[in-house]
Image (cartoon, helix red, strand yellow):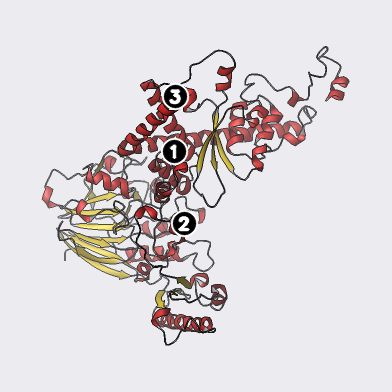
Amino acid sequence: RSDEDAFKILIATDIHLGYLEKDPVRGNDTFVTFNEILDHAQKNEVDFVLLGGDLFHENKPSRKTIHTCLESLRKYCMGDRPIHFEILSDQAVNFQYSKFPWVNYQDENLNISIPIFSIHGNHDDPTGADALCALDILSCAGLLNHFGRSTSVERIDISPVLLRKGRTKIALYGLGAIPDERLYRMFVNKQVTMLRPKEDEDGWFNLFVIHQNRSKHGATNYIPEQFLDDFIHLVVWGHEHECKIAPVQNEQQNFYVTQPGSSVVTSLSPGEAVKKHIGLLHVRGKKMKMQKIALETVRTFYMEDVVLGDHPDLFNPDNPKVTQAIQAFCMEKVEMMLDNAERERLGNPRQPEKPLIRLRVDYTGGFEPFIIHRFSQKYMDRVANPKDIIHFFRHREQKEKNDSDLSFGNVFSRPTSEGTTLRVEDLVKQYFQTAEKKVQLSLLTERGMGEAVQEFVDKEEKDAIEELVKFQLEKTQRFLKERHIDAEEEKIDEEVRKFRESRRTNTEEEDEEVREAMTRARAHRSEDAVLVSASSDEELMDTGRKASGDSDDDIPTTLSRGRGQGRGRGRGARGQNSTARRSSQRGRGNTSQGSATSSRTYKSVPAKNLSIMDAFRSVKPGPSKNASKFFSEDIIDDDDESDPLDIHITPSPKVNQRSATTSSFSKRGSQSQTSRGVDFESDEDDPFKSTATSRRNK
């Protein structure tokens, strides 16, 4: 073996830094294992480290997680050791989303000994108005090279990072996490292209890093290996947590696939019980060799299944003491797993002391489970997960029924810890497909609503649902106006139904709608941040005036606190538009009548949005014109547990009491006089009385 021509690459995926960081026992597991991975890279003098996504567990990691990660990268990846390979590709294309579009070890201000190349995963993907992720922070700091990013939903061109060491050349392709259904559809429509170098096209070792579902979770909720190009030599597959580090050849495409798996146990499922490894990849020319490296600092995880019905000699459901017998049997099984974990730890002192134990008990056949909490108390000091040791489940009898008869409640009853992946958009879609006719969507689409709820839940985009509703409503209104539909309810309903069906079939257009709505939501959030900051400045100024005794009598003290509707009433027209909007959005210090109801109003759509019927009525002078200005729409999330995702759009035919109270819509340009303590109504004949008279009236 010639070191001058051979690449040594350390491969790892799904490190999930920050997982359970607040757990007193398991809080540091991810950080300790990450240090071990980088220590292996340093000791083996690798050329670079290749990460396959999900370096962080949270989309917005905590300060502790970011600090510990930076500490480890600085400790192991900076130094004087020279880099023996060069980059031949256009780095402005490879790192086009970075403010510093070049590899970190070529930065004259940094001293990098081990470069790290990483794609993002589904846990740490770019979000927000600026589409940033945690990896961008590390990239900006010069400690990591973030590549494989794509923002287009119409076409993806994967440009490789071209590396050369001696006579060995590697074309490194990367594709960060993309929703599986979207990427599946783009592959089918031939919208994904992997670019190849023009010079010596067949002289490169083609290495591809991807972070998607490999196992089939649905019809299109995964990426088949057959979708990938056959000129690839090795695929590093992230996202799947089961360790299958040994490369497996795909007979059809004739490339190899390695699945390093996660370096920490994030779910108590069978796939996580496989021993954790990372890979040391040697590449020389077009030949490769994968060396497995076992991780010694990973917490031991033992798992076993018990079927009570398989032991009729031990358990009789009719025996009144059968529950005690089951509990004793489970204790015996747990003790056996603890003994095995202790023996394994004796040979490896770096392993954490308390293991992870999982005993799944199938009590089908008339058995009753015992109280788990009492059982867990006995192992508080011996097991890292005492609350999750026992999991009781029961197989239900399979009945012949159609897929449309699926119970929405049963979907929630399946434990996610057992490897079942539940996605919000799937639940939304299934709910509306199986719901009664009276709660079916007639204007919005299930796909768009599911994407909006997903953004609301995962990415904390609080305006996502509202902006999607507004966007699709405006688009439907424009469509009806262009068709010149008569203002008859039946005709409008029919046209809306046809328009909705046409949008459902055009998935690309619907993706564009969702993306536009999410862009609006992010821009709206940025505006809110500016408004909140300005509000804080105003409050500080008011506080300063009160401290100096300026105009104490003009503003009641009860209205000087808070940012909600009380502030709008106390200050009148100053900043009324933004204040009224913030009061309906956030509602801090909310004193309106709506806060007493059981439903939560997330946000009021501005009054300029009309209902569909109103948009096509002839505009007449007089009261009807003014009345149309005060149509508003509330997005209300009912607290009724029987209908968890029932979202109503209710038009209000008259002025909202809150809007009238704040006088933000009806009196935009004038200042509220009553809030300043001057009562004109009591002294209309002589409003300019003496100060004493005004104070008495006040």
Quadrant of the drawing holding the C terminus: top right
Whether residue 176 is visible to the viewer of this picture, yes or no, is no
Whole-percent x and y of residue 253? 15, 56
Residue 437 or residue 158, whichever sits in front: 437
536 to the left or right of 608: right
- Tell me which label, 1 or 2, sits earlier in the chain: 1
Label 3 and label 1: CA atoms lie apart by 41 Å
Label 2 is placed on what type of residue? Gly
230 to the left or right of 449: left
- Residue that badge 1 annotates: 129
Helix, strand, or loop for circle 1? loop
- Residue that badge 3 annotates: 488
Label 2 and label 3: CA atoms lie apart by 39 Å
Quadrant of the drawing holding the N terminus: bottom left
586 to the left or right of 194: right
Residue 401 or residue 647, whichever sits in front: 401
- Residue that badge 2 annotates: 409
85 to the left or right of 375: left
Helix, strand, or loop for circle 2? helix
Mark in the foreground, 3 or 1 = 3
Label 1 and label 2: CA atoms lie apart by 35 Å
Whole-percent x and y of residue 266? 42, 63
Label 3 is placed on what type of residue? Glu
Instruction: Spot the residue most to the bottom.
Output: 313
- Tell me which label, 3 or 1, sits earlier in the chain: 1
* Residue 152 quadrant: top left
